[in-house]
Image (spheres, rainbow, N blue to C red):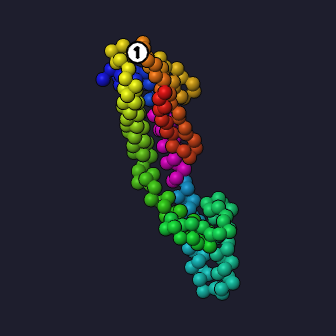
Amino acid sequence: MKLTTLLLKETEQLKFDYIDRCLEYASKEWDRIREDVKNRNDISSNWTSEWNRNRCASKVDQDAFEKKYNNLVIKLGYVKYDKWGYRKDNGRISQNAYDKFQSDTYKIRNHQVMCFDRKDYIERAFKQAEKHYFNSIDRLANRIQRKELNESNLTLKTSYIDQNISTTISDGDKTVRAYTIIACGDVQRPHYRYLVK
């Protein structure tokens, strides 16, 4: 298909930029989640050993122990304070911040990062980014075809503004504009979408 080939050629720089951002994010995500799990495991093991030492203590001591760990996980930013209670993964409300912390810890220990070494995780991110790029081009071509342009006389002009692109597609009679909106951040996976006008 001529349109898809032209779009692939025009958006080649977008492909490289997008894949680079995905690989950079995957590397940072791998480090961040592994470090988070390590820190959570340290807190959990401290809690367990202290609980074992104090489990025969008085009710007052046990309440003080529970309050200490509730305050700790709130202070460290793992759980946000909520006077109404903390919603756990099972949907139930608990008054115990440490219960919420444990629920979140269980969830993050099962994150896909924990199933791969760094190289495999980054390679997987590369394949996903490349697949997303090609699928986006196919969807874009289908959306442009609905505008009923004459494919035998297409011209494309692409301009870049930072990482976003704007492509003007014309057949001499009709003109269609396609542009991307790319978003990414420290904890937001790079993603983009095309808008067609």
Q: Magenta residues? A: 19-34
Residue 155 visible here: no
Image height of 35 relative to 9, above or below: below
Residue 125 falls left or right of residue 184: left
Name the residue rendered at 43%, 53% in the picture. Answer: 112
Judge whether residue 31 is colored magenta: yes
- Indicate the position of residue 118 as horizontal and vertical percent values: 44, 46
- Indicate the position of residue 135 as horizontal and vertical percent values: 37, 35
Name the residue rendered at 41%, 50% in the picture. Answer: 116
Res. 68 image quadrant: bottom right
- Indicate the position of residue 4 as horizontal and vertical percent values: 35, 25
Residue 134 falls left or right of residue 73: left
Q: Tell which of 178 and 29 is nearer to you.
A: 178
Three-letter amino acid code at the position of disc 1: Asp
Name the residue rendered at 66%, 65% in the picture. Answer: 82
User: In what element is the residue under mark 1?
Assistant: loop
Image height of 192 relative to 58, above or below: above
User: In which quadrant will I find the N terminus?
Assistant: top left
Judge whether residue 174 is colored magenta: no
Residue 89 visible here: yes
Q: Residues within 10 Å of mark 1 (few under 14, many from 20)?
A: some
Disc 1 marks which residue? 171
